[in-house]
Amino acid sequence: MKKSLGRKTLVTPTPVWVVGTYDADGKANIMTAAWAGICCSKPPSVCVSLREATYTYQSIVDRGAFTVNLPTVEQAVAADYAGIATGREADKFAVAGLTAERAGEVDAPIVAELPLNVECKLIHTLKIGLHTLFVGEIVDVQADEEILGEKDRPLLDKLRPFVFATTEATYRAIGEPIGPAFELGKALIGPE
Amino acid sequence: MKKSLGRKTLVTPTPVWVVGTYDADGKANIMTAAWAGICCSKPPSVCVSLREATYTYQSIVDRGAFTVNLPTVEQAVAADYAGIATGREADKFAVAGLTAERAGEVDAPIVAELPLNVECKLIHTLKIGLHTLFVGEIVDVQADEEILGEKDRPLLDKLRPFVFATTEATYRAIGEPIGPAFELGKALIGPE
């Protein structure tokens, strides 16, 4: 039996991405976003939605660039901190013990200690309501060599990302394999 | 040591959402999307990016509505199938053994057997490139009563969603708890 829960963002899970920017003074800042995802394959693009009140918002508008950095489960405290504190008051890199390094292709910092860094050039801005959606074209991805498998694909079990369980406001690790995508469903398609 | 991997959508994980629509003839159809996420809290909204070549694309444009339905790990075969086959040729609901029910608030079908159904009204369309991003305002969420915990919050361990591990093209379950969001990071903030 279904029950109506109303107009709520009760859908899950979402990623936990640490967004890196430079502010007007060139100070490197991070904030954590979960209203985010991949949004285009060509050009490869991600979207990140932020409230206009965040310090990061203006930095993205001013610089036309940001990075997405993937924390591992061991970095959950730092990632959660970056989502609580504001770059207006805190030097979040310093407090979290993280290192800002200038991205190679865009005007934004990457987080050196995080194993996967995605450099994004702002290509669209869509004001939705409380949140504004920024689309960033991926101009480079950098990864720790230790997390790479065959054909330089990042391995989940080495990357060890985690997700935001929206409906419970908790973080959860990635669990057991369910099966290969674009293969499992073939069981329902008869022989040609 | 970081290695540059180039311009690729190598960021992970993404959700696995089954998108429900009616076509021009009123036939219910589903497709599975992973380039998707929550994109605004007020109004509560999700975004789903689709290629214009998909059958679902035109249905969303025509009807101005879609649903997002969350499959459990037990429904991974059906969900993967819905991402492989096309509604132009197949009756995907029938092949997957699923039931289309008219949504209460929008002109789109929900998938009865999937435990969480999100009804969305199209409010923005943003053409990015190969993919077009659709923003749907959430006008209702319906959930199986058995998956609801305190305050009618869907419980992850009953919902049992899974994610698309982009970099490996596999599906993965949700794993162990890492900790509470907006709490873990307080360890880095000193007493006021």
Image (cartoon, coloured by chain):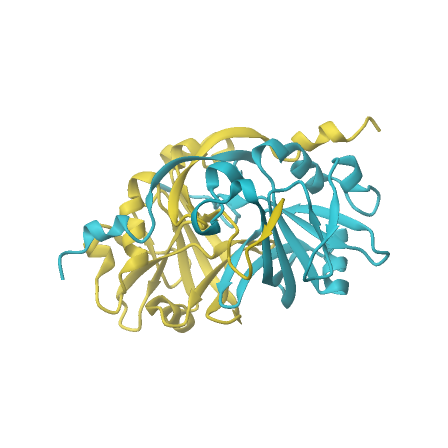
Chain colours: A yellow, B cyan
Which residue is nearer to you in this view: A2 or A176?
A2
Q: Is residue B50 above or below residue A151?
A: below
Residue A40 position within the rendered picture, expressed as x and y whole percent measured from the top left: 59, 55
Total label count? 0
Q: Quadrant of the C terminus of chain B?
A: bottom left
In the shown orientation, is residue B61 left or right of residue B115? Answer: right
For the question of whether residue B128 can be seen, the reply is no
Residue at figure coordinates x 48%, y 69% from the top left? A132
Q: In this view, does A7 lie above or below A24?
A: above
Residue B43 position within the rendered picture, expressed as x and y whole percent measured from the top left: 52, 68
For the question of whether residue A18 can be seen, the reply is yes
Residue B108 position within the rendered picture, expressed as x and y whole percent measured from the top left: 72, 57
Quarter of the view holding residue A190: top right
Residue at figure coordinates x 47%, y 49% from the top left? B153
Quarter of the view holding residue A147: top left
Which residue is nearer to you in this view: B29 or A137?
B29
Q: Is residue B177 above or below residue A136?
A: above
Q: Which residue lies furthest to the right in this view?
A: B25
Which residue is nearer to you in this view: B120 or A183?
B120
Q: In this view, does A25 lie above or below B159?
A: below
Residue at figure coordinates x 14%, y 56% from the top left? B190
Residue at figure coordinates x 45%, y 32% from the top left? A175
Q: In which quarter of the image is the N terminus of chain B?
A: top left
In the shown orientation, is residue B74 left or right of residue A132? Answer: right
Residue A136 position within the rendered picture, expressed as x and y whole percent measured from the top left: 49, 61
